[in-house]
Amino acid sequence: MSGIFTKSMARNIFYGGTVFFFLLFLALTFDTTKALPKLDNSANLTPKVIAGKKIWETRNCIGCHTLLGEGAYFAPELGNVYKRRGPEFIKAWIQAQPTGAPGRRQMPQFHLTDEELDNLVEFLKYSSEINSANWPPNIEG
Amino acid sequence: MQYKSQAVAKPYFIAAIGLFVGQILFGLIMGLQYVVGDFLFPEIPFNIARMVHTNLLIVWLLFGFMGAAYYMIPEETETELFSPKLALALFWIFLIAGALTIVGYLALPYATLAKLTGNDLLETMGREFLEQPLITKVGIVIVALGFLFNITMTMLKGRKTSISLVLLVGLWGLAIFFLFSFYNPHNLVKDKFYWWWVVHLWVEGVWELILGALLAFVLIKVTGVDREVIEKWLYVIITLALVTGIIGTGHHYYWIGTPQYWQWWGSIFSALEPLPFFAMTVFAFNMVNRRRREHPNKAAVLWALGTGVMAFLGAGVWGFLHTLAPVNYYTHGSQITAAHGHMAFYGAYVMVVLTIISYAMPILRGRAANPEKAQVLEMWSFWLMTIAMVFITLFLTAAGILQVWLQRVSDTPMSFMATQDQISLFFWMREWAGVVFLVGLVIYLLSFFVKGDSRAANA
């Protein structure tokens, strides 16, 4: 780089650029926050869903599964599992774990009560109704 | 060593390397669980192994960053650390808290750990990479504040260089954005939105400032190129990083319930995110070519050049590969993501920490550079680990392409598990590449114990 472009110019561009783009990011965040209620299915954020989210978190489901594509890639996507499998299958499946099939990936047994299972399913139903811009491409997740 | 207090960096570097070994061992366990699903089940389920693998990575990189700061700041500011005692006390607090957290993960069911550690008071657990119990998170904040206090006070009483300023801004940013880990709204979309303020604004934001500062410091030392030139480059690189990276956060906001305009913002800005990494590669090679001295530590020069190249490949190229919204629609949350994550973390952050360790550790042990034999071994470990990581990435990419094809593009999509069976060959090959990585890591460890003629101290 030539002598015309000095270190202090580079430094000023850094501070100016960072501040500008961070403010732009905040503006977009503000706009997103305003737009969210139409997209995020928060109208259906019932106490059961909230309790279900806590089950989801305290069993570290994200350590194997993805939810709206985020998480670990060891086990199926669960953002749309409510639509793929339905509530009864989900509950029966969780209760039947681990399968113990030799060599197959195993899911732990979490000993959830019926109420906890219902809440978790409510959370997965709520998640499946978030407007995810048509993702995933098909029902398999 | 120019300043006595730089010595506090040594335990930080040793701890970093120790935890790195743990991280790789758990990585191998997980890699095997991908193909032998019931391996170590139910003793170490996959989710636990993954938590240990990723959390150890974060913690050892933080140890590396802190060690780097304690080493660099006295030399940059030309004054002793404000409080070496505080630095040592925080070292033990962080190490013990980290170790207890890992023991908690392994010894207790996660739900029990959550209950015992106050998750009911403030629910922050069970989110990817932020799985730490509340008390650990609070501990991290306390350690970070103590550390920043120490570094800031040192800077205030000494010379203020651009490198130390950039490092400090990066480290403050790291601490500030970590605070979003305490914000976990019930609304899943908002939860995810602000989760990225920790994760993305760390690794594609403020951490790049730390990366740039570490690399610039080592390049000044090993090449003898004028500070003015190097610091100008540093500002250009971090400008590119933040100008592209901040709005680039949008590439995580395509499919999580956020407005669709993020597909434009995210695609355009994150498509530019390879630029700072490209500049970094050009920078590293340029400075080494223009070197005014032959530093005896060849291994450190190799690590510095490797950081530039691998960060560009892993973070830049492999990031670009799946960052455009129409592509990401198919690749989101697939093995492509895993491929990118591995090479980006290794190329950018693992390698820069190993660069500063390679440069500083011999000096901390009283010599300008390690004996020839030790350096040869270290350079072998560089090539083994780096090539192994390239293959891990290539195999995961192949697995990812097939996965996307079979599960998402095909007219008759397969289920997730059926797809995983189809691509297991690539998971096996990834595991073997992981074994080679471990061999490289063992050689790296051995390189610290090789004796021989070493040149005089006081570099």
Image (cartoon, coloured by chain):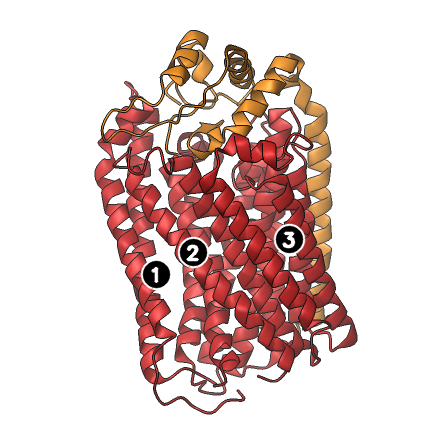
Chain colours: A orange, B red
Q: Residue furthest top?
A: A88
Q: Amino acid at mark 2?
A: Tyr
Q: Amino acid at mark 3?
A: Leu
Q: Amino acid at mark 1?
A: Thr
Q: Position of residue B356 (x, y in %)?
A: 50, 70
Neighbour class for label 2 at 10 Å: few (<14), some, many (≥20)? many
Classify residue A39 by image quadrant: top right
Q: Position of residue B172 (x, y in %)?
A: 69, 56
Is B157 displayed left or right of B357 in the figure?
right
Pointer 2 residue? B346
Tell me: residue B188, above or below residue A82: below
Contact flag, marks 2 and 1 (Cβ < 8 Å): yes
Pointer 3 residue? B174
Along the viewing direction, whichever of B15 and B428 lies nearer the viewer: B15
The residue positioned 37% from the left and 47% from the top of the image is B27
Pointer 1 residue? B386
Q: Is residue B240 something that shows in the picture? A: no
Q: Earlier in the sequence, mark 2 or mark 1?
A: 2
The residue positioned 53% from the left and 87% from the top of the image is B459
Tell me: residue B170, above or below residue B5: above
Tell me: residue B306, above or below residue B79: above
Gap between marks 2 and 3, in whole Å? 19 Å
Is B453 displayed left or right of A57 in the figure?
left
Question: Could you tell me which chain the residue with mark 2 belongs to?
Answer: B
Gap between marks 3 and 1, in whole Å? 27 Å
